[in-house]
Amino acid sequence: MTLELDALLAGPRGRRLCLEFALRTTWDSASSDAEELRQAIFLTAYDLDPGRGTSRVLFGPGAERFPPPTPSPEDIARLLDTLPLAEPHEGAMLLSLTTAVDRARYWQEPDGEDVLAAAPALHDPLARIAASLVASSHARWWATPMDSAQWAVTFVEADAPRPAATKGAGQTLEQWRAAQLKEETVAERERPSDARARWSGTWWSKPPAALTQTTRSLGGRGPVGLRLIEDGFGWESATAEQVAVPRDARVYEIDGPAAWADLCRRHPLEVTASRRHDWYRATGRIGRWVIPDWTQVQHDIDAVHLSADGYLTTAGLAIPVDDDLATVLAGWNPDQTYWFRDVTRSASTHQAWTYHQKDDNWELSTAR
């Protein structure tokens, strides 16, 4: 399997990855051109942001009243065209991917950087960056199926730690479905039918969080689940344990929009009333919405794996399921696998990890 450049640029997270990598490239340079590009992206993204002047502001005396001239997307495209591109190194790629994932939001309009990255003028300059990333050996794992060695990460000492799997997978899924049906019924009765109404609720389409979730490990950098996280809580401490992957496990691979749409088509659960407001703001689409009914999915498969490539090309898009229905992949993390059958963790592989803000990295503190 290989990364497809056009598919990468079709997804909002893929485009954001390329823009973030361009920005990170300028950090390694003290040239005036690099500084000009950083400043131009900052000002233009601010100007395009739906929260301009409210949730996002400029600082300094008179900054809001007398802002500096805003470069156009065409200006930024010309600056990107002249940006020197060295061979991408693993750290820069991983940090750019981490930022692209962290900035995803499905409960409101795309931020200014996402709007900028979608500008037609930036397609070709971002395509040049995408080609460099796709060709890198450090991106090979992005387009691969679930790795045979899987690690479960548990965040600790945080305001909102990830819930542990205390029930069996079957019971968790049944309770999830009952909650979804109840929420949809209440939303249909009590929430506005106009998708443009200022209302928010459930915006994710992932399986229930109480299921076991795993990712591969990147060697000394630790499990992917430590860093590639949507809507994270700024955790600074975590533990990781390897999970025994059953040899007969049936794993469904979400490697792009078609695979996600097919899953929704085969096992649809309508969530229009509970998702319409958030997903309209995120995608601009008005219509009926579905997600997979995970209680039905579990009869066919044991786990669902979202590859990093699948994430970058799928997350945040309004993906057609049929002529009347669409879906959004939201709340998932790249390379994440959700288990619909009970799996066990190996205590002998226990690791403790600590986040260091200074170098934006996780470090293995102990292992036994």
Image (tube, helix red, strand yellow):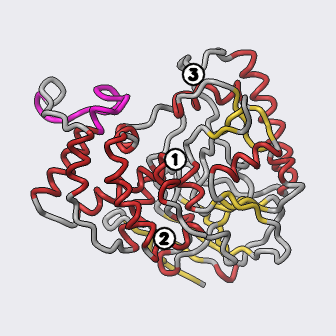
Task: Considering the whole magenta stretch, tell me its main secondary structure.
Answer: loop
Q: Earlier in the sequence, mark 2 or mark 1?
A: 2
Label 2 – label 3 distance at C-alpha: 38 Å
Q: Position of residue 154 (x, y in %)?
A: 61, 63
Characterize the local packing of mark 1: few (<14), some (14-19) or many (20 or more) Cα atoms within 10 angstroms. some
User: Of the numbered discs in the image, which one, if any, rests on residue 199?
Assistant: 3
Q: Which amino acid type corresponds to the residue marked 3 in the rendered image?
A: Trp
Q: Which amino acid type corresponds to the residue marked 1 in the rendered image?
A: Asp
Q: Earlier in the sequence, mark 3 or mark 1?
A: 3
Residue drawn at 30 percent across, 39 percent down = 45
* Residue hosting label 1: 231
Characterize the local packing of mark 2: few (<14), some (14-19) or many (20 or more) Cα atoms within 10 angstroms. some
Return the residue nearer the eye: 4 or 202. 4
Query: Range of the magenta residues?
Result: 45-62
60 w.r.t. 4: above or below: above
Residue drawn at 36 percent across, 74 percent down = 89
Mark 2 residue element: helix
Characterize the local packing of mark 3: few (<14), some (14-19) or many (20 or more) Cα atoms within 10 angstroms. some
303 w.r.t. 53: above or below: below
Q: Earlier in the sequence, mark 2 or mark 3?
A: 2
User: Of the numbered discs in the image, which one, if any, rests on residue 327?
Assistant: none
Q: Is residue 93 left or right of residue 194?
A: left
Label 2 – label 1 distance at C-alpha: 23 Å
Return the residue nearer the eye: 170 or 70. 70
290 w.r.t. 98: above or below: above
Mark 3 residue element: loop
Return the residue nearer the eye: 175 or 250. 250
Q: Is residue 223 left or right of residue 122?
A: right
* Residue hosting label 2: 139
Q: Which amino acid type corresponds to the residue marked 2 in the rendered image?
A: Ala
Q: Position of residue 83 (x, y in %)?
A: 22, 60
322 w.r.t. 295: above or below: above
